[in-house]
Amino acid sequence: MNLSASSFLILSFLFFILPNLSSSKPMNCTDTSRLCTSFLAFKPNQNQTFSIIQSMFDLLPSDITADSTGEDDGGGGYIYLKKNCSCLTTTPHQYATNTTFTIRQNSGYVYDAVVSAYSGLAFPPNTTRASSAGAVVSVQLLCGCSSGLWNYLMSYVTVSGDSVQSLSSRFGVSMDRIEEANGILNPDNITTGDLIFIPLDSVPGVPYEARKINPPAPSPSPVLTNSNISAADQVNHTSKGGHVPYIWIVGGLTVVLALLVICILVCICLRSSSFGSSDEDGNEHNFQILRKSSFFCGSSRYNCCRSGDFRQTNNGEETQSHHQAVAIPKALGDGVFEIEKPMVFTYEEISAATDGFSDSNLLGHGNYGSVYFGLLREQEVAVKRMTATKTKEFAAEMKVLCKVHHSNLVELIGYAATKDELFVVYEYVQRGMLKNHLHDPQSKGNTPLSWIMRNQIALDAARGLEYIHEHTKTHYVHRDIKTSNILLDEAFRAKISDFGLAKLVEKTGEGEISVTKVVGTYGYLAPEYLSDGRATSKSDVYAFGIVLFEIISGREAVIRTEAVGTKNPERRPLASIMLAALKNSPDSMNMSSLKEFVDPNMMDLYPHDCLFKIAMLAKQCVDDDPILRPNMKQVVISLSQILLSSIEWEATLAGNSQVFSGLVQGR
C-alpha cells in the first residue's frame, strides 16, 4: 500500500509519539493459567454516565464501588471497578483483562478515542483506523494479580500532585507496600501518567448508590419556652420539684390510645380493600391473589417496572400503589417466590399489547409456548404464552430470572396468569434468534454474520452462561443452551433466553450436580447427561461447544442427509462431523478438511488461525469426559483473546475499503 506524505505522518504520530505520552506499563507474569480478582481506579468525565461505564468496562452494577469521600475531600470523584485479571498467553506475558468499547463519534482515530475514554488504563489498539460511530473495538485493560502478600491489586494512573506518600495516606496502605508491589526504588521519581498498583486487603470504596444517598436531616426538637407555659403551670412545676403534672399524663395516654385505634382501623380498611379487589363482572380471566405483597423484580430500565407500581381501578383508570397484589396460579401454591417480585399485568393488558395474539405479532414457537411481540405501556416486549399445565416450567423461569440480572441474559419484566393460561413478559430483543442468522439467513431476510460478529456473539453468550454458573448466589445450569435460545439485540450483542429448564445445582463431594430427568434438545445433550441425568455446569459447556461449531459452520446441530440405499434421511450430529474434520486438520496452516465445513456465507473473510482456535475450543467443550472440558470462565478468557486477535486482523484490511466495509456491516 502506497502511503501519501500525510498518511505517513499520521502513522508516525500514532506508533511512535502517542505511546510515549503515557508511561503506563503493564505487569509482567509467567503463569498463563493465572486468574485473579483485581480493581481499577477510574475517574469518569461528565459524559460518562453509569450505564456508559458499565458498557465500557463490561461490568455489573455490583462490580462498581465509589470513593467514600467527596471531590473536596481528596476522593476526586473516583470509582473502583472489579474485573477478573489473567496472564496473557501472547508474548510478552502480561496481566490484562478484556472488554469492548463502542465508538460514539465519527471524529479522530480509534487510538485517540480509546486513550481519551480510559485515561491510561488500557492498551491502546495498534491501529490507524478512523473512528466510526457504532464501531466496536476490543480493548485490553491494565490490571495486576497479587503475589500472595495482599488480597488484591488496584490499577491507578497517577495525576498531578500524586506521590507515594499521598497515595499511602489516601488508600490506607503503607508506603513500603506500594514500593514493594511496584518495584519502586526512588519514591520521588513518580510522574503524571504512571501506572501504580495499589495493594489492598479488602474491596475499596463503598457501594456506588450509597454515596449518593444523604442521611435525612434530624428534625428539630421543640423548644419549650416560658411563653408556652402559663404562670400557674410554672408555679405548679416548681412546687412539685420538676415532676410532670397528673393531668398531663392522662392527656398523653389518651392521645396515644386514640392514635392506636386509628392505626388499627386504617390497617383493617386497607386489608379489606386489598382482598376484595376481585372481578365482580364475571370475567373468565380470574386471578388467585397471593397475600404476600413484596413481589417485584422488573428491571428499572423499563417504565412499566419501576417501583411506583400501578393498579387498575374499576373504572379503568390507573392509580399508583406501593402494595400491588400479586396474581399467581393456584397450582403454584403460596411461598413459591421468596425473592424479588416481578410486575403483574392483567390478561386484558397482555391481549391488547399483542393485538389479541395476532399471527402478525408471532415471533416464534418454543418448547413450552409461543412468543409474541407486544407494545405494553409504551415499551416493546416479548410475551411467552403457555397453557396452565406448564406451571413447573413457568415457576422455574420466574424463580431464576427474578434472581439473575446480567447484560447477556434476557431481562424479565413481569407476568400475567389466568385459570387457563400463563404469560411471561420479557424485554424485546430486536434481531431474534441466532439460529435464524446462521442457518440459511437470506431465506429469513437476514444478512450473513461477519467473522467479528460471530466471535463477539460467542463471547457474549459465554459471559451470560459464566454468570449463572459462577457469579450468582445460588448456581444454576441452563440445560437448554442452543442457537434458538441465544437472541441478538439491535447491535448484534447476544443474550441467553428461555430458562424454563434451568436447574439449581447443589455442591456435593463431586462438585456441583443436579440429578434430574433428561430434558433438552437432541444434538446438544452431553453424554453423561443422556446416560444418567447428571446435570452439571459441564453439560452446559458441552452444549455451548455445539453452538461454537454452528457459529463456525453455519450448519444445524443435527444434519439430515440422505442415507445410501434408503428413503429415510440419516440424522448425524454436527459434533461428530466437525471432530472428524479437526482430526484431519492438525493446525491452522493445514486445515483443508475443516475448511470444507466453514460457513460459505463468510466468503473466506476470516483469520484462519482464529477460526482454528475456536474450533479447538469447541472440541475441548464437547469432550466425552466432563472433567476434561473447560469451565465457562476459561472459555470466556479464550474467546476474549481470540476476539482481540480477530479485531487486529480486521484492522489490517482497512486499506481495502470494500472488504473492510463488508466486515463491519451491521455492527
Image (spheres, rainbow, N blue to C red):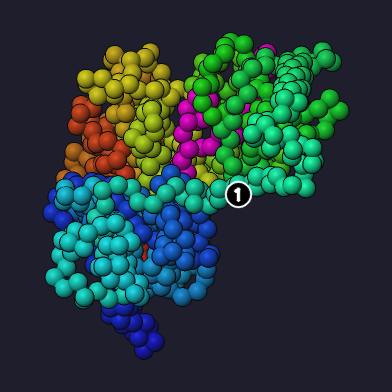
Quarter of the image for residue 191 reads: bottom left
State the image coordinates of residue 595 (x, y, percent, origin top left): 29, 47
Vertical relation: 487 (above or below) 244: below
Q: Is residue 133 above or below residue 469?
A: below
Query: Label 1 crowding class (10 Å Cα cut-off): few <14, some 14-19, many 20+?
Result: few
Viewer-nearest residue: 380 or 547: 380
Give the residue displayed 41% in from the left and 18% down from the top: 519
Q: Residue at x 36, y 89 (%)?
A: 5
Does the magenta portion include 250? no
The answer to whether residue 367 shows anywhere in this view is: no
Is 7 situated above or below 442? Answer: below
Tell me the residue at 13%/70% (across/down): 185
Quadrant for the N terminus in the image: bottom left
Please tell me whether mark 1 sits on a helix, a strand or a loop.
Answer: loop
Residue sitting at the far right: 315
Residue 173 lies left or right of residue 67; in this view the side is: left
Outermost residue toward the front in this view:
239
**Residue 449 appears at what percent x and percent y?**
45, 50
Q: Which residues are magenta?
A: 397-422
- Looking at the picture, tell me which residue is in the foreground, 353 or 612: 353
Residue 264 as seen in the image, left or right of residue 423:
right
Residue 468 placement: quadrant: top left
Q: Was residue 402 drawn as part of the magenta stretch in this picture?
A: yes
Q: Amino acid at mark 1?
A: Ala
Residue at 33% from the left image edge and 61% from the top image edge:
170
Residue 12: x, y in percent? Answer: 31, 82
In the figure, is residue 197 to the left or right of 520? left
| Residue marked by disc 1 | 217
Q: Nearer the viewer, residue 170 or 141?
A: 170
Tell me residue 319's x, y (percent).
Answer: 78, 34
